[in-house]
Image (tube, grey):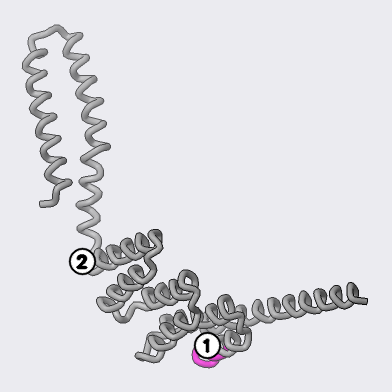
């Protein structure tokens, strides 16, 4: 039995004893005193329900709904998030790796490990290594394989500014999963990539023209 449950039971028991003692005092009193007692009892009961009973019922329902595997996953996610908030990025990676050991078919921890490498440790090459190794490690279901491949394309574009590598990965998605929503998403991403690349090229030309004018 957990500590929180013991505390709740003790508090409720104590309140019931206090109520019984007060009732023994007011049961022979007038109607006005009894009315005050009932109102006070209702107020106290409402406060106790909000403070202890409702959270207790919520915990019980949560235990009934979630399996032990989901609890473990939530625990690792919570601990990983706490480590990130503390700046302990290797510690966060360890928790995601434990989650991956327990659920090797889940691509989410793979993506989170890569995200930490790319965004927190500023090592996009390590992020790509994580993603590519796991992509090649097994025959992933279509949705999971596409998820990882999109993450690879994102790392190439966002963190390495490698338009060609990102485009290549999107073309692989289109080729591997034709006539699927993943293919449609990849086509859309390629259109955005080309627009971004064109804008970058125009900006570079504008800067170059301005620089040449100033020198002249």
SS type, badge 1: helix
The residue to which callout 2 is attached is 68
The residue to which callout 1 is attached is 173
Q: Residue furthest top?
A: 30
The image quadrant that residue 98 belongs to is bottom left
Q: Quadrant of the C terminus?
A: bottom right
Structural distance between the alpha carbons of marks 2 and 1: 35 Å
Residue 26 point in image, percent of width and height: 11, 13
Q: Residue furthest front?
A: 215
Residue 7 point in image, percent of width and height: 14, 41
Residue 121 point in image, percent of width and height: 46, 72
Q: Nearer the viewer, residue 97 or 190?
A: 97
SS type, badge 2: helix
Magenta region, residue range: 171-179
Residue 200 point in image, percent of width and height: 72, 77
Marks 2 and 1, the one that precedes in the sequence: 2
Q: Main secondary structure of the magenta part?
A: helix
Is 172 contained in the magenta span? yes
Query: Which residue appears at 62% of the width and 88% of the height?
Result: 164
Residue contact between numbered discs 2 and 1, judged by CB atoms under 8 Å: no
Query: Which residue appears at 18% of the width and 10% of the height?
Result: 33
* Residue 152 to residue 120: above or below: below
Left-right relation of 64 to 133: left
Left-right relation of 213 to 176: right
Query: Which residue appears at 70% of the width and 77% of the height?
Result: 195
Q: Residues within 10 Å of mark 1 (few under 14, many from 20)?
A: many
The image quadrant that residue 100 belongs to is bottom left
* Residue 3 to residue 143: above or below: above
């Amino acid at each position: 039995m957990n500590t929180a449950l013991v505390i709740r039971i003790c508090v409720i028991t104590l309140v019931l004893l206090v109520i019984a003692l007060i009732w023994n005092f007011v049961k022979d009193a007038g109607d006005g005193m009894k009315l005050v007692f009932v109102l006070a009892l209702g107020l106290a009961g409402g406060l106790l329900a909000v403070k202890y009973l409702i959270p207790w019922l919520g915990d019980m329902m949560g235990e009934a709904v979630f399996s032990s595997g989901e609890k473990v996953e939530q625990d690792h996610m919570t601990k990983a998030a706490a480590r990130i908030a503390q700046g302990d990025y290797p510690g966060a990676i360890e928790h995601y790796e434990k989650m991956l050991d327990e659920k090797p078919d889940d691509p989410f921890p793979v993506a989170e490990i890569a995200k930490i490498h790319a965004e927190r440790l500023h090592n996009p090459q390590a992020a790509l290594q994580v993603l590519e190794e796991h992509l090649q490690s097994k025959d992933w279901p279509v949705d999971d394989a596409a998820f990882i491949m999109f993450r690879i394309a994102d790392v190439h574009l966002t963190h390495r500014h490698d338009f060609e590598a990102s485009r290549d990965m999107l073309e692989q998605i289109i080729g591997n999963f034709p006539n699927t929503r993943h293919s449609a998403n990849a086509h859309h991403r390629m259109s955005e990539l080309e627009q971004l690349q064109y804008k970058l090229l125009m900006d570079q030309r504008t800067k170059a023209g301005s620089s040449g004018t100033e020198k002249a």
